[in-house]
Image (cartoon, rainbow, N blue to C red):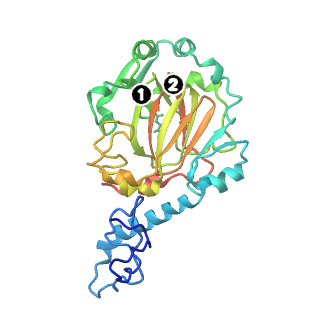
């Protein structure tokens, strides 16, 4: 029989009940710690190797800090907020590494009504664009992103995505450098988000994502804070806190060995730590901006034909990518 924490066993044959048990870890357990830390933990030996235990101690810390969110419904909710001031966004979200969906910040964007597929075809014409092509052939299409760079006149790209939903052709942030000139004609349909962003940054402002329903961005985290501004169509996000990094099979760079948290055929037995994470489910609509803080994990599925612009040129420091440890 399993005993719940501090539950006492009915006394058998007049024997005294056993002493209280240690709390059992049901979920959200530390990844690597084999026993809960307690006051009775042995003192470190003089020859103890602090560098060997450091990763386990960090996992222990992250696990327990993250578990504290369970104490408050507000803390386990990704809020939708309207009319946040700059100061509120900074103090309640950016400085706290806490996601939020901003509603109404794009209400003056002509793009919200203008950017139909036909309008985009007309505006961009036959200018060549680069996109990520042939992705369905390769499970690791994100890690091997350079193999998938493909070029075509914009009209041919649109023919491709308007005749076939799915993940095979997608203009992404990887292509933004090469598409800057071709897509610049669309800038006039957007409004600079001056409450949050600066023009005075070396990072590019505004990276375009254009694709059909069914595009997928696999589970990863970014090395910057990000605004994900949804202009056309809906996108569904699965989001996991940065502190759960040790439970996400982060085998390479910013990627997880788990390609999709939504896959019904995912071999859960192979990835037991996934049972310990909290997955937030957020769908963003046209005109909404998802603030994705540094190092929060996410995977993305486009529900409709979709146009998204991502921004990293915040008014506040956003250069953590510079000292990210190499694999
Ligand atoms: O919209 C997408 O497909 C991916 C966006 C994303 O993951 C990002 O900007 O980091």
Q: Residue at x 57, y 61 (%)?
A: 71
Q: Residue at x 33, y 55 (%)?
A: 326
- Count residues near mark 1 (Cα–Cα under 10 Å), then give few for <14, some for 14-19, many for 20+: many
Taking the image as drawn, is residue 129 in sight? Answer: yes
Q: Give the answer, above or below, for where 321 lies relative to 24.
A: above
State the residue in front, 111 or 251: 251
Residue 215: mark: 1
Q: Position of residue 55 (x, y in %)?
A: 34, 67
Q: Which image quarter is the N terminus in? A: bottom left
Mark 1 and mark 2 residues within 8 Å of each other at the beta carbon: yes
Q: Is residue 56 left or right of residue 122?
A: left
Q: Position of residue 68 (x, y in %)?
A: 53, 63
State the residue in front, 106 or 32: 32
Q: Give the answer, above or below, for where 172 lies relative to 4.
A: above
Q: Residue at x 60, y 26 (%)?
A: 187
Residue placed under numbered mark 2 in the picture: 306
Quadrant for residue 32, please give it: bottom left
């Amino acid at each position: 029989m399993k005993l719940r924490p501090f539950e006492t066993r009915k006394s058998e044959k007049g024997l005294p009940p056993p002493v209280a048990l240690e709390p059992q870890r049901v979920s959200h357990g530390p990844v690597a710690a084999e026993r809960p830390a307690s006051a009775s933990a042995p003192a470190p030996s003089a020859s103890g190797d602090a560098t060997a235990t450091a990763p386990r101690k960090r996992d222990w810390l992250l696990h327990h800090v993250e578990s504290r969110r369970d104490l408050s419904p507000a803390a386990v909710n990704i809020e939708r907020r309207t009319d946040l001031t700059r100061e509120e966004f900074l103090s309640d979200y950016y400085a706290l590494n806490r996601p939020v969906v901003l509603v109404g910040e794009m209400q003056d964007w002509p793009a919200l009504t203008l950017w139909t597929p036909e309008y985009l075809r007309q505006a961009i014409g036959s200018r060549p664009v680069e996109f990520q092509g042939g992705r369905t052939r390769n499970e690791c299409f994100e890690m091997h992103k350079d193999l998938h760079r493909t070029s075509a006149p914009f009209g041919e790209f649109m023919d491709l995505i308007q005749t076939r939903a799915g993940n095979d052709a997608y203009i992404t942030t990887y292509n933004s450098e090469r598409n800057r000139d071709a897509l610049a004609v669309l800038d006039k349909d957007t409004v600079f988000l001056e409450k949050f962003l600066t023009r005075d940054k070396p990072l590019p402002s505004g990276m375009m994502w254009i694709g059909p329903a069914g595009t997928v961005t696999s589970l990863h985290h970014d090395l910057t804070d990000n605004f994900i501004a949804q202009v056309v169509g809906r996108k569904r996000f699965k989001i996991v806190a940065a502190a759960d990094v040790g439970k996400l099979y982060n085998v390479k760079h910013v990627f997880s060995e788990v390609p999709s948290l939504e896959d019904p055929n995912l071999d859960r037995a192979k990835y037991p730590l996934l049972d310990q994470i909290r997955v937030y489910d957020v769908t963003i609509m046209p005109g909404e901006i998802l603030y994705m803080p540094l190092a929060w994990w996410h995977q993305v599925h486009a529900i409709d034909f979709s146009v998204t612009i991502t921004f990293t040129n915040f008014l506040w420091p956003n250069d953590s990518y510079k000292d990210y440890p190499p694999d």
